[in-house]
Image: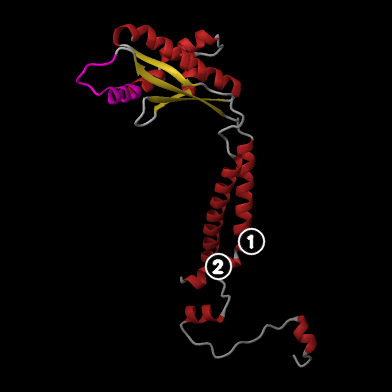
Amino acid sequence: MNLSEALKILRRYLWLIALAAILAGAFGYFFSARQTKIYKASITMLVGQNQGLAENLNLTTALQELASSMSKMISSRTVAEKVVADLGLDIPPEQVLEQITAQPVQQTQLIEVTVLGPEPVEAALIANGVGNAFSELVQRTESSRSGLTAQVWQSATIPTDPVKPTPTRNAILAVLLGIGIGVTIAFILDRLDTRWRSTDEVEQAMELAIMGVIPQITSETHGNNPSY
């Protein structure tokens, strides 16, 4: 099959491809729109030190490495339990832990903490609660021993727009998927259709040259030509 034949098939089944794209896009949009909206609240924490480190260590590099380690400590049950207790939340620590993500900002002493949840006010409240709880835990366990500190550099604000679902984006992806499905079905139907649609197809199938073509007789041609 060459490009010209493929284009003929696509033109023949253009209605099918368009229908598949429209149905897929509509399904993708409305399915996404009915999903629970998720909001994202973020805080930024700064890892520092009061008393300094050993003289043979580079202070900046050491604190960057500590930021990476502390980001893993933030996503711990200990922090989640303290957040629930401090805020008086009526949810288990495991649920809070599932909402928390902490990632160090590369080449800095900063840690970005994000909280995802269906309620924007609660997401911001938990995010700020995580920052305060972790800061207190570090101060309680590390400040007098090594001088390490972790403080909230930027607090969370109440998010106004959900981060997911994204109906428009999902609808576009669904349309592209629908086009692909429609094209696939078009080529399958063409393979299953054994009818000849042109003299070229007849010559190719029979491997013989066509000497003449008998026109189709319809009621119109029969009326215009009584001799038929």
Q: If you read the primary sequence from the N terminus, does the residue marked by circle 2 or circle 1 appear first?
A: 2
Amino acid found under the numbered disc labelled 1: Trp
For label 1, the SS is helix
* Magenta stretch: includes residue 55: yes
Q: Residue 177's spot in the image, x, y percent?
A: 54, 50
Quadrant of the drawing holding the C terminus: bottom right
Residue 88 higher or lower than 46, as above or below:
above
The residue sitting at the left extreme is 56
Residue segment shown in magenta: 52-68
Does residue 119 appear anywhere in the picture? no
Few, some or many residues within 10 Å of mark 2 (<14, 14–19, 20+): some
Amino acid found under the numbered disc labelled 2: Ile
Query: Residue 220: which quarter of the image?
Result: bottom right
Residue picked out by circle 2: 9
Residue picked out by circle 1: 15
Q: Residue 97's spot in the image, x, y percent?
A: 46, 19
- Residue at 49% from the left image edge and 18% from the top image edge: 96
- Residue at 76% from the left image edge and 93% from the top image edge: 227
